[in-house]
Amino acid sequence: MLFRLPASSLKSVRALKDVAVHPTRIVARQTTVRFASSSSASSSAKSVLDSRAALASAAIATVGSIAWYTHLYGSLPFIGEVHASSPAEEGLHPQHYPWSHSGLFDSFDHASIRRGYQVYREVCAACHSLDRIAWRNLVGVSHTADETKALAEEVEYEDGPNDQGEMFQRPGKLSDYMPAPYPNEEAARASNAGALPPDLSLIVKARHGGPDYIFALLTGYREPPAGFEIRDGMNYNPYFPGNAISMARVLFDGMVEYEDGTPATTSQMAKDVVTFLNWAAEPEHDERKKAGIKAVILFSALTVISLYVKRFKWSLIKSRKIFYNPPSDKAH
């Protein structure tokens, strides 16, 4: 009757015989399958790692390209800019100058700030105010405390009322702000043919081009080209919007005698006063860069520590092997 059994029954009987006679062969086969699954998992992890590296490389390349484009051309074509005066309203675009404080790790030239304050005091202060800067801001930056006190005491400030209810004049203190040249806006316009001299506290941040524009404006006075009409009381300057500015040229060679003996050329005075105005616009510049460097060092160290802890904690979990032993059929 055996010859009437189907072929599938003979195959199952042969398989059971192999298990009984050669059990190690089945284990080896299962081990091979398990090793194959482990190798596939490692290959998939490698592909994910490669894809992440490719994504990071693409992101770095994109950011670098955008940064290089903005360094060359100043702005992106698809992102608008917000300035007190837009590039469309500008005159001749100034070139970029290598300012000593423009680098990531560079600070202000404090000797230049001191000379720049001297230029502002002897030239610019006759028309322009510096409302946001107090005398105490100069201490430790360009002058000592005693020098700053002496400068403040040269100015008379109205104070009061006194015991009799009257206002009185007193010498300036470190807590006082630098005096304005005019008592009000109307007096300023009346003294400048209707033009209002702007406050210089934030002038570097308020103009497109920043210090490059201010320097180019101070040194860019010249004779108007043929065919260009200038109204009475106006001066030609290609860097000013409209090329006509009511402020006349104010910097000439030898106009200021520097205390440290630096030659007072027009470009030197313009460079010093622009450095001073740049500091006035952001007095926290040096401290901000110091804090930034400390933050980068701190967070870099924390990142390295966190990566090490993550690798240490997860190494045991990632290296575990899970074996599955199916339950045996107790019915047979």
Image (tube, grey):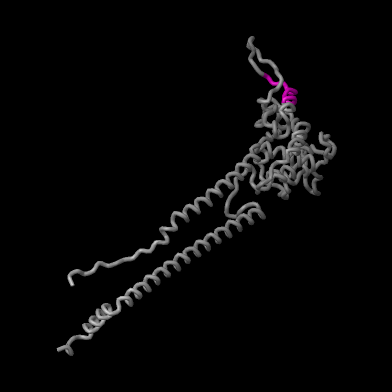
Say which quadrant the C terminus sits in: bottom left
Which of these two is toward me, 43 or 19?
A: 19
| Depicted 23 relative to depicted 61: above or below | below
Which of these two is toward me, 251 or 28? 28
Residue 97 placed where, x, y %?
A: 73, 48
Task: Say which residue appears at 52% left-offset and 50% top-offset.
Answer: 305
Q: In which quarter of the image is residue 34?
A: bottom left
**Point 75% across, 36% down: residue:** 116
Taking depth in this image into account, of 38 and 141 the one nearest to the observer is 38
| 22 over 328 or under it: above or below | below
Which range of residues does the magenta coloring cover? 149-158
Q: In this view, does 166 lie to the left or right of 29?
A: right
Tag count in the figure? 0
x and y percentages locating residue 230 in the rendered image: 77, 42
Q: Is residue 313 left or right of residue 76?
A: left
Q: Is residue 328 visible?
A: yes
When the figure is inspected, residue 24 is found, relative to residue 195, above or below; the finding is: below
Q: Where is residue 122 in the image (x, y as percent from the top left)?
A: 78, 31
Q: State yes or no: residue 105 in magenta.
A: no
Q: Quadrant of the N terminus?
A: bottom left
Q: Residue at x 25, y 67 (%)?
A: 327
Q: Is residue 92 visible?
A: no
- Does the magenta portion include 150? yes
Q: Nearer the viewer, residue 49 or 182?
A: 49
Tell me residue 303's x, y (percent): 53, 50
